[in-house]
Amino acid sequence: MRYLKQFALILAFTLLGEALHALLPLPIPAAVYGLILLFLALLCKLVKPEQIRETSSFLVGLLPLFFVGPLVGLADSFGFIKGDLVPILVIIALGLLLTFGVSGAVVQGLLKRRQR
Amino acid sequence: MNLTDFFSSLSYLPVMLTVGCYLLAVFVQKKTGWGFLSPIILGAAAVFLVLKLIRMPVAAYTRENRFLAYLLTPATICLGLSLYEQLQKLKQELPILLAGILAGTVSSLLVTVLLCRLFQLNGALSVSLLPKSVTTAIGSVLSEENGGSASVTTAAIILTGNVGYLLGPVLCRLFRLSDPLARGAAYGTAAHVIGTSRALAEDPLAGAASSLSLTVAGLITALVFPLVLRFIG
């Protein structure tokens, strides 16, 4: 019964997210609305972590599986990227380098400044 | 009934394949201890091999795999709980972390837009590459809803994550990131869930910062995505 209640609560946030996605004219996924709402509900103590913990950790554990299907599907859409493979790899490499460096350096720099 | 039709009629086969091959790949990675063997890539390769073997079309597999995809939205929403719990641990450093995640996410989007224009990639491909630093749950949906390809986005996301996982320690030295919070923010912002697993292995505090960063970076990307799209031709 406990897990069923947890699942129902998570489904309720999913439904809310879906409704917001349908009603608001923004290209924001339903999951993002749901995530923000759940986070706010936890912050305002409307929902306690214990009310969703086990089912939530089961669902989060499923996340890597959602990478597998689309990757298999890539076999079918490979023609779409074949001609641009080199630019794509360059973009991924430079993007990673810059994102990693900027986010890390900003945090490190600000932490150092605070210590002084 | 021939064998291919028989396999295609089994609606639970694709989901079983996905879960089974992924678990097998996790097992293989643990046994060999080879970090570069991503269970996701290995699992996908195993699924592909089985599909070829039983002559099941990839399209039929992806179609039935939607039962799993159905749980993607609730699973992503549950990241809200981990966001809440990491926040309790990192309250003191929150403004600094947020500044870093925001700067990193904006740089990621800007450099991608600039390079896509430089290489004159088409609009659909550019949209597919934009969310490559965030977790698939958010990135692939953003891409698909704006005319991109979920498969290409997923591949870019996985590649980004795995390169970040492998080169992370080198990048930390290159950018002189000695603080666990700085390392965590870098791993989570640049390399999402896959990077977070590396950060967790390095240091619990880095893991918490990375976990917070991956969710916040996903949220920021989703919120500014409509703006960024305007710069794509």
Image (spheres, coloured by chain):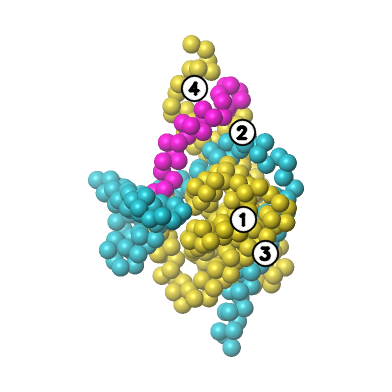
Chain colours: A cyan, B yellow
Residue A82 vertical placement versus B88 (above, below): above
Mark 1 and mark 4 lie on one chain; the one further toward the N terminus is 4
Mark 3 on the same chain as mark 1: no
Local secondary structure at mark 3: helix
Q: Is residue B72 visible?
A: yes
Question: Which chain is mark 1 on?
Answer: B
Foreground pick, A8 / A78: A78
State the residue at coordinates (55%, 68%).
Answer: B102
* Residue B1: image tag: none
Question: Which chain is mark 3 on?
Answer: A
Local secondary structure at mark 4: helix
Which residue in the protein does label 3 denote?
A98
State the residue at coordinates (61%, 74%).
Answer: A106
Type of amino acid under label 4? Ser
Q: Which residues are magenta?
A: B50-74
* Residue B232: image tag: 1
Mark 2 on the same chain as mark 3: yes
Q: Is residue B62 magenta?
A: yes
Type of amino acid under label 2? Asp
Type of amino acid under label 1? Ile
Which residue in the protein does label 2 denote?
A76
Nearer mark to the viewer, of 2 and 1: 1
Q: Position of residue B165 (x, y in %)?
A: 63, 55
Name the outermost residue toward the right. Answer: A86
Mark 2 and mark 3 lie on one chain; the one further toward the N terminus is 2
In space, the residues marked 4 and 2 are separated at their CA atoms by 18 Å
Nearer mark to the viewer, of 4 and 2: 2
Question: Which chain is mark 2 on?
Answer: A
In space, the residues marked 3 and 1 are separated at their CA atoms by 20 Å
